[in-house]
Image: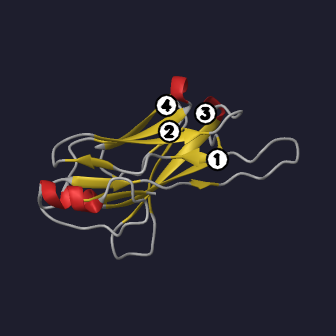
C-alpha cells in the first residue's frame, strides 16, 4: 500500500516519520506523502517459495511533481512473466479503486475514467513495476496497492 498525503508544511512532513509504515495519513496543502504496502495474489506451489512484492516505506512529492511508486518482485520470480494491477484507496474509504493493469506496452489496461496521468512501466533490472502519477494532485491522496497476477493479455 502506498499512502498518499499532502502535508501542509516541511515540518509536518518531518513529523510524519519516513520510517513509520503504519502511520495514519495527514492532509494539508503542501506535498503528497506516499507510504507503501503490497498485496500478492498467486497460488502457492510446493516447488518454490511464494512470491513477495516489496515497496519502499514512503515517498513525498509536491503538487505538480511526478510520483514513482515501485513494486518489486522477490527472487527467483521474474517481473517480465507477470502483470501488475494497481489500486487506490482514498482516506476514510474502505473500497479500493482499480487504476490500471500493466504487463508491457502491448499488454496494459487503464479504464477511461482513470486520468492518463496514471501510467506504469517495468524496470527489469530491479525486477519491479513502477506506478507513475504525473502532475500529482491533492485528490491523489490515499493508499496505493499493487497486486501480482499472471498476464491477462488485454485485447
On screen, residue 65 versus residue 114, left or right, reads left
| First in sequence: mark 2 vs mark 1 | 1
Query: Are circles 3 and 4 on residues that touch, CB within 8 Å?
Result: yes
At 53% from the left edge and 54% from the top edge, which residue is drawn? 38
| First in sequence: mark 4 vs mark 1 | 1
Q: Which residue is mark 1?
A: 52
Task: Give the Cα separation between the discs numbered 2 and 1.
Answer: 22 Å
Viewer-nearest of discs 4 and 1: 1
Q: Secondary structure at mark 1?
A: loop
Q: Quadrant of the C terminus?
A: top right
> In which image quadrant can residue 95 be found?
bottom left
Q: Position of residue 32 (x, y in %)?
A: 23, 54
Rendered view: 26 above or below 33: below
| First in sequence: mark 3 vs mark 2 | 3
Name the one closer to the observer, 66 or 113: 66
Task: Give the Cα separation between the discs numbered 4 and 2.
Answer: 12 Å
Amino acid at each position: 500500500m502506498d499512502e498518499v498525503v499532502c502535508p501542509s508544511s516541511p515540518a509536518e512532513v518531518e513529523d510524519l516519520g519516513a520510517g513509520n509504515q503504519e502511520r495514519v495519513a495527514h492532509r494539508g496543502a503542501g506535498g503528497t506523502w506516499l507510504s507503501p504496502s503490497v498485496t500478492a495474489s498467486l497460488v502457492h506451489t510446493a516447488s518454490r517459495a511464494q512470491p513477495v512484492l516489496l515497496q519502499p516505506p514512503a515517498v513525498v512529492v509536491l503538487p505538480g511533481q511526478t510520483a514513482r511508486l515501485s513494486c518489486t518482485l522477490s527472487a527467483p520470480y521474474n517481473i517480465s512473466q507477470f502483470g501488475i494491477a494497481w489500486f487506490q484507496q482514498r482516506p476514510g474509504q474502505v473500497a479500493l479503486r482499480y487504476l490500471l493493469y500493466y504487463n508491457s506496452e502491448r499488454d496494459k489496461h487503464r479504464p477511461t475514467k482513470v486520468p492518463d496521468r496514471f501510467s506504469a512501466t517495468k524496470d527489469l533490472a530491479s525486477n519491479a513495476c513502477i506506478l507513475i502519477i504525473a502532475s500529482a494532485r491533492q485528490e491523489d491522496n490515499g493508499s496505493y496497492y499493487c497486486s501480482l497476477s499472471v498476464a491477462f493479455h488485454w485485447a
